[in-house]
Every structure is written in C-alpha cells, then in structure tokens.
Image (cartoon, coloured by chain):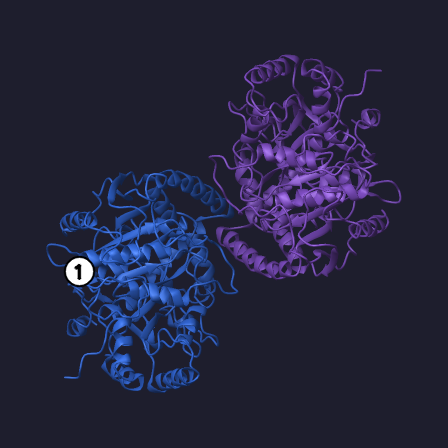
Chain colours: A purple, B blue
C-alpha cells in the first residue's frame, strides 16, 4: 500500500509546503493510473511529465509566483495541448496542435502539471458520457449509471482523486451535469470570461471552459488563474459584478422552481431537493468570519415560474444552434460519416433542417425570452435549481440515447444562451445513496459572488470547518470536502465496467 | 409670398419664444407641402394635425417640460405611427398599428408635431432612394442624382426645410448616405441605444433609428429625447462613454483611410476629401468656449489601413444578414412576389443561398474581424471617412440598380455590424457644386462625444458663430448652418422630376 496522495489543490500545496517534492509525488500519481480507465483518452507519458517537472523547477528557480506549483490536473480532450493529439473523442478527427489552448498555457505557467486528456461525449455533444469510441464513462459512485457528460472523463478523474482539478467545457450543461452526478463542484464561468483560443468549439457562440474540483475555493482558484480574454473572437461578454449578491440589509432572494414535478421521484430526487432547500435556510452570509457572500442577512426563498427559462432551454434543444456543431464537423460528415458516433451524427444532421432565416429568427426569439427572464431577475438575486432532474443508467441511455440525454439538460440548457454564470455544488445524497447536486445561477459577471455563495453552501454542510475565502492559501484537503466526498474511492469498481 | 418659416429646431423654438403660435405656423407649413412630392408617402391631414396641436396645448397647460414643443418632424414610413398605415414603401405589405413606435411616442410626448411619413427604398433595402412604388426621390441639390437611401424622403424633407428634423433608420448606411447627398447631419446612434419597438426591421440585429437635421446640436437634441431602451428585445448594447474623446494632454488621433482611390475622381470627390482633411486641421476642441470635444489639444491625422473594415462591409453585403430581411417579407414573397419591387425582391431572394451553418459561420467571421478592428482602435480615437465614395445619377442607378447601390455602402456598411456610433456631417462641396459629406465614427457608446466633435466641425466651417453646446436652447437657425445649407431651396426643381 503506497501512502495516500493529496486530493484537493489545497492539499497538494500543503503537502509541498510540508516538504514533499513534485518530482516524487507526480510520478507516484502517474504510476497509479490504470491503463484501461475509460476516463482517460491520453495519459501523459514519463517524458512529457519529466519535461513539465523540469520546467516547473526552472520557473521556481526564477522566483516566479506559481499559485498551482506541482498541482496535477487533466483537460477534456477538446482542449488543445501542444504536441498531444486533440481527438474530441473522434480518432478520425484528431489533429495535433502546435500551441496550447489559452487556458492550458495559463495553468502551466502557474505551475500546474498536466496528467492527461480525458474522455467526452464526442464533439462535446451529449450530457451522458457514453457517446465515445473510447468507452462509456460510468459514475464512480454507482457504476451502473452514467458519469454525465459531455465532460465525463474530467469529472471522473477528479471524483476519484486522480487529479486535483480538471477542465471541462460547457455549452448546454457539460460542466455541470457531470459535477452533479459525481459529487463535485462544477464551476461554469460567465460566457466570454475565459479566453477560448485552442478549445474546439461545440457551439462557438455559447461555449465556455469549466472547472471540476472537490470544493468551491479550489475551483475559484483555478478560474482566477485561467480567466481573462485572449486574442480570439468574443461572442458574449458581461462586465464583472461585485463578489457579493443582494442588497444591503435585505435577505438574499433565492429563486427556486415553483414546480419540481420533473424531478425523478422514484430515484429520490424530490426528497434530496427538499433536503437541499432545508440546507438553504441554514446558510449564513458570513459563515465563521469570511467575506460576506451577500449584502444582507438571512435567506428569502422565492418560488418562481421557470417558464421563460424552460422556453430558452427548449430553444437550444430544438433550435438552429446545432448548426454550430455542424460547422465544426461538416467536412468529416461528408467524407467519413461512419467515423462519427451514430447518435452524435444523428443529432448534428438535424442542422440541415435550419436555414439562415431560421437561425436569425431563433436569435430574435431568444432576445425576446431574455427580456422575459429579466423580469424574473427583478425579484431574485440568485437562482437555485437541481443540477439534473434524474440520473439514468448506462442501459437506459443505450436504449434511448437521444431522449434520455435530452431530459438531463432541463436545468442547464438555458444558462449559456442567457449569458449567466453557474456553479454546480454537491447537495448530499438521495435516500438510496446516489449523489445529488444543485446549481447556483446568477447574472453574467457574478462568478466571484457565486464562488463566495458556494463556499457558504459547502460550509453549511460541514459547519465545523475553518472559515475560508475563495483564495486563501491556508486550506487543507479536509477543510471543505462534504462528508460524502468520494475522492479516491472506486478504482476497483471502475475496473469492472471500464 | 408667405413669410419664411423657421428651418432648424432652434429656429422653431426661437420663433415660438418670440410669440409665434404652433396653431398658426404648423398649418402654414402643412399648406406649403406639394401633393406630388415623392418624398412623402403620407402627409398628415388637417384633422390629424389639429389633434396633435390640441394635445400639445393640453400638455402645455399641464406645465410639462416640452423640449420640442411645436417643432415639426417627419418619420420614415417603416416606423409606426398609431392610426396611420406603415407601408415600408410596399402598399401590399401595409398595416395600421394601434401603438406608436417608442421613438415616435417620446417625440410626441416632448411636444413635436408629426407632419407626415416619408418615402424609402422598399423595406429599407437600398442606399439609393429609387426603389419605391411611390417614386424615386431625387437629390434636391441636383435633381439628376439620387437622394440616397433608404431614408430618402426623410433626408429630402429636412434638406428642403419642410420639417425641422426627420427620423430615418440605419442598418447599412440608410441614415448616413442620404445625409451626405443632401448636405445634412445624419446622426446614427450606437445600435441598442434607442428602443426599437414599432420599427419595422430590416436586419433586426443591426437596425437603429437615426436622425436627420440641419446641424449637429439639433440632431443631438432629438437623440436626447428619443434615446433609451424600451421593452423590446436587445441585440447589441454598449455602455455610454464620456462626452469627450481622446486622452488628456494628447492630440485627438483621427484615423483616416490611407487609400481613398475608391473616391470618384471625376465627380471631384477626391478634391472634396482633401478639403475636408484641411478643415480637420483647423478644428479646436473648445471652439469659442463650449465643453471640449476631446481631452487634449490639437489633431493628429493617422492614416489607417481600412482592410478589416472593408472586410466587414463585404461580409454584410455578401453574407447571410439578408436572411433577416427575408424573415420580414417571407410571407409576401411567397404569396404576392409581384408586390415587391423587382430589385428588392432580387436582393432578398439571395437569402435562400444561406443555411443556418452559413449564418453562424458569418457571425464567427465577424467576431474575428471585430478583433482585428480593435487593433486599429488602439491607435486612433475616432475615424473620419467620406460618407459615400460617389453620387450616382438616377439614370445610372436605373441601368445597374444592384451594382450602383453596392458601391455606396463602402464607408457605411461595417459600422452597425461592429456596434459603432456614427455622425455624418456636411463637408462643403465638390468643385462642381455637389454636396460632399464626411462621417465621424467612434466606438459604441460615444454618441455624446461625436455630437460634441461634430459641433466643432460645423463651427470650423462657420468660425464666426456663437459657441454652442449640444443642448443649448439659445441657438438660432443661422448659428450653425454651413454656408451651402440648402434649406427651403429647390421646391421648384423637385416639381420637375417628382
């Protein structure tokens, strides 16, 4: 039995401060990775790791500030890493970029160590994690069920403690649904907040890079390193908002769906949601002394009619944005259609149903619906929703791949179309022990406020821990992990289904 | 011979302060309007005028602030006025709205008196002013040449002093090209700055309501009344910028096209442009004491490569945005194609060439080009261009309606796609006495700064006049009109061709 490795970013940094060395821990971590783990598409080889460790040592000798020095991470395989193939889970599509994606470059420059590239629903088209020739990624906590997608592998490797954090991408929920299914934090920044150069688009006007981590401060720390524009095109932008929500002296107005009949009762999701609402009432803005997450005192729960958000979600699912996916793969669709996953191909082929007039008309409809949602925001400061309404089995998804997938986006599809920020957080378990997650959603630019609120949320689950701010370096691995945190658990279970 | 009526807003307000009454001047004005003037699609009848005058009197009795009390104006006939048909220059398309457009309501609430609705290139599709079953609108200053369009009638009635100001719309230059051809100010606000409810769309994601006036302070006064969002959808938005340009203590960096070989040399446009550049060097930011239009002292002319702007202009002309026009008229195209002007129909039919993928890909290309133009803006504070590169005759346009039209948008097409603000201003005459115009262009939100700069520009042409700010009420009609100002001139000439 080898000694346990850290799991959180805070844990890794603490281990290094206590004298451990990246040149020892990183090879030890790499040695533990299973060859047949479907979460990985590529594990960096010894030479690639050594080169990174050498560069890290050089940066440290220069005295550079390295907020992620020696912290292991993974990236979804639709994000470019120089010299490694980007497959997007489609070998026939693969190319090898010469330049890192902006986000990868920034993380490497902060001292983080890339461990590998992770599996995904092909071309980031799916919320299930099964649409890949590299294998379906099961949920580590219940291997009969899906990991969620499209950022399936990134969620899985963080959930199992194989890396401290991982990058996903999120267009319709790909950075949130897998967080919900894997008891993780999934931080989905405001679209436009993160430079997207070197990220293979799904829907270029909507995509954003997301972060999976075990706790909110870790995720916020990663965002702080990787955020900011690059020289690429910008399709949405929102000015940064304050790091707190609400109005001075007033309770935080938390909108919640008035009708949650979509939640899977048989799976215990309604019970779990009720539990989440109960936790909501225990939130304190100042926790045990950190910066307040909202300006007033107390919580006001505001049941809201989700109709305008639901309409936006349907617009994404039924509308012309699929043509953006088509734009990426059209050459391959024409020349090697069989190289594309049949379900993904079927989904993307629907692009042919939409002409340019339809594309513009959907944009008009979206703008109208956006105005309708603004009326909702007049009455709330933040929105809290279940991350997903159910958690299907691999078998159910295999039987009805499009329908089962479409059900999962109910609480995620609308977010990027409306330019909102979101933060998926663990919210306990269902009665049967399945992970349950909720997502905080706030107006674009509220990323810092959501991180503060999410930290309060996690502290409410573990009230005895140290008060923390989003970037305090003194965190240890144990500080903020929910009791049910599954890090490093099910390597064995995975081997059965991998 | 009846006594002359005022022409500018300042002139009308001054006349009322001197004792004239709307109930006298407005009927006198209406009585002078020719029945066969192709600039009008509808002249308000006596009952409609009387109702307005009655309401004005009621508002005045209430003591309301009425910044445009009794000032006559016209609106392009793609802007709704309750109870009057909106034709968009297509009788088969006409409908009668129950509600005023937002901009019309605001102007009426400020006391302005609507005189009539004006001719346009059908569906605001054209830059020539000839594509209308209500007749081609000739240039009042040279009736052999086009008025420019699509806001042809609005420009014509202001140029001839028939109203103090008129509303146009501007998607690709429809509020600027006619200003250039008619020796007018054409203020084209930042897209999104003006609520668009009740304006029939051309390209909904790009359209903005524009103002024609005889001088910049008048145009700015109208914008101040009509600006601000309404409850309609928003496709572009820019935060308001300061009312001055440039950096403290530095010269104003004015970008000008390095290559103006596109200007019609035979028509004297290059000579006229050289004259405009000469006037540029005489600009003073503080004129004779008003608020400074730029933060520093002096002017630095920066020749720039227009390539990225030209590429954006071509993208509008050759790209899928025509599908937005198709969205408006598709029912009529299908049921009564012959009801549509043949050239307009031919232009809009090109929408069928574009599928949704092409629509999104053009948006990607635009976003890339927008980044490229940002590099240009790093080196300049404002851009000065000719308003149009040539001024075709009616005969030339009739011979080659699409080609001649397309040439006119070179310096206007790119502006709304990039979310910029623009202000077309008179810039003297060509050697043959044709009007010549230039357009100031600045980043979105710079509307107030452009108004200040445009006022300096007009003062530089008439240096002996009173210093003015954009909203000073003490202006008189003579204050700011360039020497060649054509107000009230060619009623006779028009009758020949109308």
Determine whether A149 is above or below A118 in the image: below
Task: Please name the residue that numbered disc 1 is placed on.
Answer: B462
* Quadrant occupied by the N terminus of chain B: bottom left
**A390 displayed left or right of B177:** right
Determine whether A498 is above or below A275 in the image: above
Please identify the residue farthest to the right as the structure is shown.
Answer: A432
Residue B170 appears in which quarter of the rendering?
A: bottom left
- Toward the viewer: A63 or B443? A63
Q: How many marks?
A: 1
**Percent position of residue B183, x then y:** 21, 62
Determine whether B487 is above or below A73 in the image: below
Determine if residue A79 is in view: yes
The chain under label 1 reads B
Please identify the residue farthest to the left as the structure is shown.
Answer: B432
Q: For the residue labelled by badge 1, is the local secondary structure a helix, a strand or a loop? A: loop
* Quadrant occupied by the C terminus of chain B: bottom left
- Toward the viewer: B189 or B330? B189
What residue is drawn where x is 74% and y is 39%?
A467
């Amino acid at each position: 039995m080898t000694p346990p490795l850290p799991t959180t970013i805070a844990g890794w940094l603490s281990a290094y401060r206590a004298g451990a060395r990246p040149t020892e821990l990183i090879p030890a971590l790499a040695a533990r990775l299973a060859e047949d783990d479907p979460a990985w598409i590529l594990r960096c080889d010894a030479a690639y790791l050594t080169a990174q460790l050498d560069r890290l040592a050089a940066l440290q000798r220069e005295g550079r500030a390295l907020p992620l020095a020696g912290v292991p991470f993974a990236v979804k395989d639709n994000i470019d890493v120089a010299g490694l193939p980007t497959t997007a889970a489609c070998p026939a599509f693969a190319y090898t970029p010469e330049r890192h994606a902006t986000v990868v470059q920034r993380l490497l420059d902060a001292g983080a160590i890339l461990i590998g590239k992770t599996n995904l629903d092909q071309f980031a088209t799916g919320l299930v994690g099964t649409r890949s020739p590299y294998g379906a990624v099961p949920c580590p906590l219940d291997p009969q069920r899906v990991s969620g997608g499209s950022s399936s592998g990134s969620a899985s490797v963080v959930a199992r403690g194989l890396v401290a954090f991982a990058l996903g991408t999120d267009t319709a929920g790909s950075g949130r649904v897998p967080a919900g299914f894997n008891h993780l934090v999934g931080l989905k920044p405001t679209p436009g907040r993160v430079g997207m150069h070197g990220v293979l688009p799904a829907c270029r006007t909507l995509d954003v890079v997301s972060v999976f981590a075990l706790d909110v401060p870790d995720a916020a720390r990663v965002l702080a390193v990787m955020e900011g524009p690059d020289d690429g095109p910008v399709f949405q932008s929102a000015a940064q908002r304050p790091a707190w929500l609400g109005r001075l002296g007033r309770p935080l107005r938390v909108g919640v769906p008035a009708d949650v009949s979509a939640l899977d009762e048989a799976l215990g999701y309604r019970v779990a949601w009720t539990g989440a609402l109960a936790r909501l009432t225990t939130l304190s803005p100042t926790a045990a002394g950190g910066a307040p997450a909202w300006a007033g005192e107390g919580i006001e729960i505001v049941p809201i009619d989700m109709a305008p958000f639901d309409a936006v979600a349907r617009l994404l699912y039924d509308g012309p944005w699929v043509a953006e996916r088509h734009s990426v793969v059209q050459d391959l669709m024409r020349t090697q259609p069989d190289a594309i996953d049949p379900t993904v191909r079927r989904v993307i082929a629907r692009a042919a149903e939409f002409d340019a007039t339809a594309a513009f008309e959907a944009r008009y409809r979206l703008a109208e619906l956006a105005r309708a949602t603004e009326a909702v925001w007049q009455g709330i400061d933040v929105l809290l929703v279940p991350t997903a309404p159910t958690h299907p089995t691999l078998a159910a998804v295999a039987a009805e791949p499009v329908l089962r997938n479409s059900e999962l986006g109910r609480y995620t599809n609308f977010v990027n179309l409306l330019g909102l920020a979101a933060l998926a957080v663990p919210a306990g378990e269902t009665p049967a022990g399945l992970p349950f997650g909720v997502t905080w959603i706030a107006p674009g630019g509220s990323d810092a406020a959501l991180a503060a609120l999410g930290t309060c949320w996690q502290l409410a689950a573990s009230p005895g821990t140290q008060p923390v701010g989003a970037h305090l370096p003194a965190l240890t691995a144990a500080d903020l992990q929910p009791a049910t945190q599954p890090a490093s658990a099910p390597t064995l279970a995975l081997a059965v289904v991998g």
